[in-house]
Image: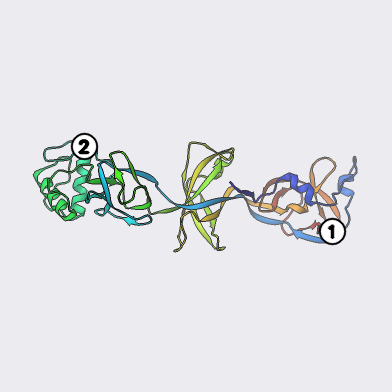
């Protein structure tokens, strides 16, 4: 996982200060000694300071899952990869008999026929029949009535199935919503049997997937707003909608899955498109800050700023976006500080 720190670490400070001002020890030497006159200056600024990390991700379709067949025979038709299927459409055909997509969260674990009751599987079947226009007399409940059986026969006639009034797993696949065929795992002419994988499907919503180092887990708070940079240089707003709770090894690093939903998905962006996601970590509000390169290391191990020809000791706080939070007596926004040019 490519990881680029936007904030600068303190080790980099010493490298960027070039000719570091080492001040004399004892007395008021630290305050009185002055470095060589700087060639540039920068202002002390009051405002918000944010630390962020830039991570590599990729655009994927959410909700990947496997669909397994429940019938034996020869595949005579199959939905193409990339196609989106909705309720009532045919996923594939075995011996020319269709296997139809219906909406529901519970898999069909038993045949449904008149007299069956006490099950949410009956309720989701009746709901699907009414949506498809076959349930005018059906009451959506947990009981498979004569009206339900009549609606099933009407649906079977339209779908090209034997009009038995009985629904089983050889005829339908219940999935929560419309699906996109990510990959067809069978082809026309293949022999299938119950339990064989026939499709890999996804939802139709696109997310940005990140493999986030578990050490940075605190940066991916659910609901946090992020910026997503696309390959063409454009930027899209996003929001963290999923944070995994199980670490997995990836290239020797323990990572967790993070999902980001884009506020707007541009047309033509392909699956697996690489993107860059900017996650904000912490933020300090209404603080004084200067460019990191303005810091001068002092002999006592702290830092100072060159102000008006004198080195003024200061305390540093948060680093972020190439700047560092500062505090100390007499510091005010608008003051000029020395900045080395190299």
On screen, residue 57 versus residue 16, left or right, reads left
Residue 273 seen in render: yes
- Name the one closer to the observer, 299 or 144: 144
Q: Please indicate, yes or no, whether residue 135 appears anywhere in the rendered image.
A: no
N-terminal-most mark, 1 or 2 = 1
Where is residue 139 shown, x and y percent of the image? Answer: 14, 47
Q: Residue at x 56, y 44 (%)?
A: 219
Image depth: mark 1 or mark 2 in front: 2
Secondary structure beneath label 1 = loop
> Which label was assigned to residue 38?
1
Question: Is 247 situated above or below 39?
Answer: above
Q: Residue furthest front?
A: 189
Report the side of 102 relative to 150 (left or right): right
Quick check: 243 left or right of 150? right
122 vs 76, nearest the viewer = 76
Label 2: few (<14), some (14–19) or many (≥20) C-alpha neighbours in 10 Å: few
**Spot occupied by residue 261 in the image (x, y as percentages of width and height):** 46, 53
Quarter of the figure with residue 23:
top right
- Quick one: SS at disc 2? loop
Q: Residue at x 79, y 42 (%)?
A: 302
Residue 137's spot in the image, x, y percent? 11, 51
Alpha-carbon distance for marks 1 and 2?
Answer: 82 Å
Per the rendering, the mark at residue 110 is 2
Q: In the rendering, at what x and y percent does residue 329 appear?
A: 76, 48
Q: Quadrant of residue 120?
A: top left
């Amino acid at each position: 996982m490519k990881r680029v720190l936007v904030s600068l670490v303190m080790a980099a400070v010493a490298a960027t200060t070039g000719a570091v001002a080492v001040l004399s020890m004892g007395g008021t030497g630290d305050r009185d000694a002055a470095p060589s006159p700087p060639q540039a200056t920068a202002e002390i600024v009051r405002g918000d300071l944010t630390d962020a990390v830039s991570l590599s991700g990729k655009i994927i379709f959410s909700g990947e899952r496997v669909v397994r067949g429940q019938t034996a025979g020869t595949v005579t038709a199959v939905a193409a990869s990339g196609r989106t299927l909705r309720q009532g459409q045919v996923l594939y055909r075995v011996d020319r008999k269709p296997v139809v997509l219906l909406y529901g969260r519970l898999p069909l674990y038993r045949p449904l026929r008149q007299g069956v009751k006490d099950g949410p599987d009956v309720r989701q079947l009746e709901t699907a029949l009414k949506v498809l226009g076959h349930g005018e007399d059906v009451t959506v409940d947990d009981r498979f009535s004569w009206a339900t059986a009549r609606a099933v026969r009407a649906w079977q006639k339209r779908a090209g199935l034997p009009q038995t009034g009985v629904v089983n797993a050889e005829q339908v696949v219940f999935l929560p919503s419309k699906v996109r065929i990510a990959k067809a795992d069978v082809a026309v002419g293949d022999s299938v049997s119950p339990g064989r994988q026939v499709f890999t499907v996804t939802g139709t919503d696109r997310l940005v997937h990140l493999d986030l180092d578990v050490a940075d887990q605190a940066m991916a708070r659910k609901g946090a707003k992020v910026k997503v940079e696309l390959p063409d240089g454009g930027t899209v707003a996003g929001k963290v909608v999923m944070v995994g709770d199980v670490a997995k090894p990836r290239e020797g690093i323990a990572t967790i899955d993070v999902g980001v939903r884009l506020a707007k998905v541009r047309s033509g962006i392909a699956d697996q498109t690489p993107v860059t996601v900017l996650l904000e970590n912490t933020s300090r509000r209404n603080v004084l800050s200067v460019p990191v390169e303005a810091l001068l290391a002092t002999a006592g191990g702290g830092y100072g700023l060159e102000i008006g020809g004198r080195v003024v000791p200061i305390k540093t706080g948060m680093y972020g976006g190439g700047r560092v939070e500062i505090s100390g007596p007499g510091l005010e926004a608008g003051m000029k500080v020395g900045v080395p040019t190299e």
